[in-house]
Image: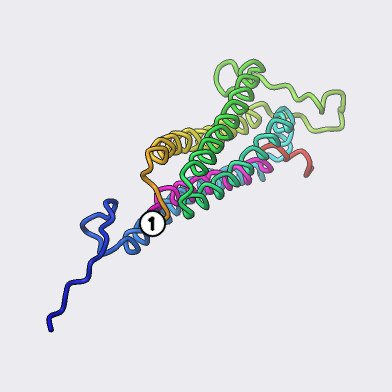
Amino acid sequence: MSDSPAVTAHNPELRHHFADMAQQKDAASLGMWLFLVTEIMFFGGMFCAYLIYRLQHFNDFAAASQSLDITLGAINTAVLIGSSLTVVLAVNAAQRGKRKLLVFYLVATIVLGCTFLGIKAKEYTQKFEEHHVPGPTFHFIPTRMAGHPEQPPIDERHAEMFFSLYFVMTGMHAVHMIIGVGLFSVLTFQSWKGRYSAGYYTPIENAGLYWHFVDVVWIYLFPLLYLISLHG
């Protein structure tokens, strides 16, 4: 009696240096988490710099923060929370092999991401018109504190420092959003072509992790930049 070799279905997405799809998925997930750790360190440095200068010049930072549009910031926060939901639903659709549903939720995520970027562009335009962009034309007059002589004078240099950090932090976040939208656009095209299934959806899952990280960064940016005046 001779033993017959076991017949196993070969997944075309399995790379030759992995034993099976499970090992490949674990390696890809580990790589994504390591990448996100480097991103945490990257944004962490900016957060630390911001907090140090904020403690040193709180009144000036609070006065500068009052010129930001809290309504637009809050809308963008809601938009990103909604996009996190669509990403979760996209991963779930991929796990169940629902191609059309997967494409729908990926497109919804892209639309929400573009909405966020559009609102952010509107905010940046306002800052340019108000001459709040750091540089030779920078000029800042605190609006809410006008007419209150008991308030300490605002140092324009410190206000410019706030806006420098504002543009750097939100600008880098916006760059990550643009990358995410581009990434999901590619995944949407590949999903429509039927590349992903219940047996292989690792790129969708890892892209979702990246998107969630970018969303969490904004959850911290919004209160730190927009809501300072509410604490003093």
- Locate the N terminus and report the quarter of the image it occupies: bottom left
In this view of the protein, which residue sits in the foreground, 212 or 4? 4
**In the orientation shown, which residue stands out farthest toward the front?**
1
In percent of width and height, residue 222 lies at: 66, 40
Decide if residue 36 is on the left or right side of residue 229.
Answer: left
Where residue 73 appears, x then y in whole percent? Answer: 68, 34
Which quadrant would residue 191 be assigned to in this image? top left
Left or right: 5, with 108 as reference point: left
Q: Answer with the quarter of the image where residue 60 lies.
A: top right
The region drawn magenta spans 199-224
Q: Residues within 10 Å of mark 1 (few under 14, many from 20)?
A: some
Looking at the rendered image, the quarter that the C terminus falls into is top right
Number of labels in the image equals 1
Left or right of 126 in this view: 147: right
Mark 1 secondary-structure assignment:
loop
Figure coloring: rainbow
Dividing the picture into quadrants, the one containing residue 80 is: top right
Say if 155 sits above or below 197 in the image.
above
Residue type highlighted by circle 1: Gly
Q: Nearer the viewer, residue 94 or 158?
A: 94
Residue at the extreme left of the image, as rendered: 2
Q: Is residue 79 magenta?
A: no
Residue 113 sits above or below residue 47 on the image: above
User: What main secondary structure does the magenta stretch of the protein show?
Assistant: helix
**In this figure, which residue is indicated by the disc labeled 1?**
199
Q: Where is residue 94 in the image (x, y as percent from the top left)?
A: 47, 50
Residue at the image point whose x is 87% and y is 23% from the top: 147
Q: Where is residue 87 in the image (x, y as percent from the top left)?
A: 54, 46
Is residue 205 a member of the stretch shown in magenta? Answer: yes
